[in-house]
Amino acid sequence: MKRKINKGIWLFLWCVWMMGCSRQQQVEVLVHNPLLEERCGEIVEVAWKELENVLETVDPRQLIVYDAEQREIPSQVIYQGTELPVALIFPVSLASEEEKTFFIRKGQPASYEPLVYGRLVPERMDDFAWENNRVAYRVYGPALEATGEISHGIDVWCKGTERLVLNEWYKRGDYHRNHGDGMDVYAVGRTLGGGAMAPLRDGKLVMGNNFTDCRILDQGPLRFTFSLDYAPYEVGDYRVTERREISLDANTHFCRIRETYDGLPAGSLVAAGIVLRDQPGEIWRDTVRGVLGYWEPENWNNGENNGHLAVGIVFPHALKKIEETQGHLLAITEYPGTVVEYWMGTAWSQWGEVKEATDWFECLNREKKRLENPLIISINH
């Protein structure tokens, strides 16, 4: 005998079904700023598994992020060098202790103007260069090493524009002078330059040579990540193979660096360093908080006053010590046996908001607080 289901039950079941369908149409993301200060254009991540939990089948090419006013927000799916998506990222700006809601839906995203970029530069002796809308850097490759010029450090470019200029500068071939968009007047040589890392042996830096191989892991438009491999070198009795992974987001002065030393025992000392100049500059150090900064003396490398370059390093933990030695300001810590992670950043007094040493040291302090107090992300299913 068949039982009839009244209209009220049918209506209830239909509503439940519709609610389930609506839940599968979008992901609601709440982002909260726990700090008592503004955060502008900071990149947030939503794990890919969170999206799949709500949206079920997800095409990485078919996702759009909206704010509460239904305006599309630039976004990027990151892969971290794998074949499968890892997370979706997008920028947010929040006032002190503010919370905002964003929505992720299936659809065809717009074409976003890249704010980060990088590449191998074979036409300039295998440089690897990268930039965002604030800063730019390069490191040196195998073709340059073959000429006898060896450098394990990071070269700092002084940008004077938010435009991406890497390709323009290499094409111009005259980036040691300011043509209105910045220049390269930073001297690296056989040093760590602006924030590279090396093992210590008997208190002395043991640096590798130029990188031997590079790989792009994510190519913008909001985050650029790549890895560099170095030929094995001797650190005391240990033969060490180094991999350096660098990631740069849009809208920041700071790169995240992850160093791996295969063959180096856990507990060994390593140091991230900033090369010091002959003339006096200003130094700020905080061993307990893991922060150090350097405000270089005025730069006159091309016969003109190029202002001041600023370099800083921020660790997520306390350091064993900070030393001025071997021509460097060194942040010394123990290698955990897997990966050691830290942030390095730069600024230039002739462009941007950093004009004085105190501005730079406050910028480092804000970066440390940002790392200590990450944005709080909640997913409403």
Image: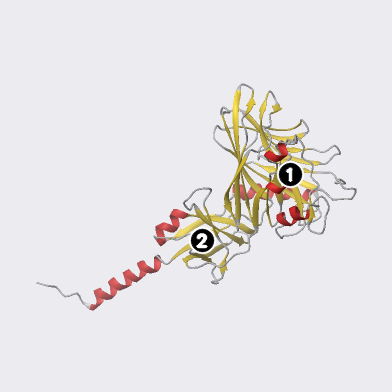
Q: CA distance from mark 1 to mark 2?
A: 38 Å
- Mark 2: which amino acid? Leu
Mark yes or no: residue 364 visible: no
Pick out the residue farthest to the left. 1
> Which residue is the site of mark 2?
30
Residue found 35% across the figure and 66% down from its top: 20
Identify the secondary structure beneath mark 2: strand
Q: Which picture quadrant has residue 261? A: top right
**Which of the labelled discs sits on residue 381, or is there none?**
none
- Number of residues whose C-alpha sits closer than 10 Å to that of mark 2, classed few (under 14), some (14–19) or many (20 or more): some
Q: Is residue 192 left or right of residue 78?
A: right
Q: Is residue 106 left or right of residue 98?
A: left
Q: Position of residue 279 (x, y in %)?
A: 86, 39
- Number of residues whose C-alpha sits closer than 10 Å to that of mark 1, classed few (under 14), some (14–19) or many (20 or more): many
Q: Position of residue 281 (x, y in %)?
A: 83, 41
Q: Is residue 354 left or right of residue 13?
A: right
Which quarter shows the C terminus? bottom left
Which quarter shows the N terminus? bottom left
Pick out the residue farthest to the bottom. 7
Q: Position of residue 191 (x, y in %)?
A: 74, 35
For the residues labelled 1 and 2, say whether their Cβ atoms are less than 8 Å apart: no
Q: Which picture quadrant has residue 238? A: top right
Q: Nearer the viewer, mark 1 or mark 2?
A: 1
- Mark 1: which amino acid? Asp
Residue found 48% across the figure and 59% down from its top: 60
Identify the secondary structure beneath mark 1: strand
Q: Nearer the viewer, residue 193 or 174?
A: 174
Residue found 59% across the figure and 50% down from its top: 373
Q: Position of residue 195 (x, y in %)?
A: 70, 41
> Which residue is the site of mark 1?
155
How many labels, in total? 2
For marks 1 and 2 on the same chain, the one whose residue lies earlier in the sequence: 2
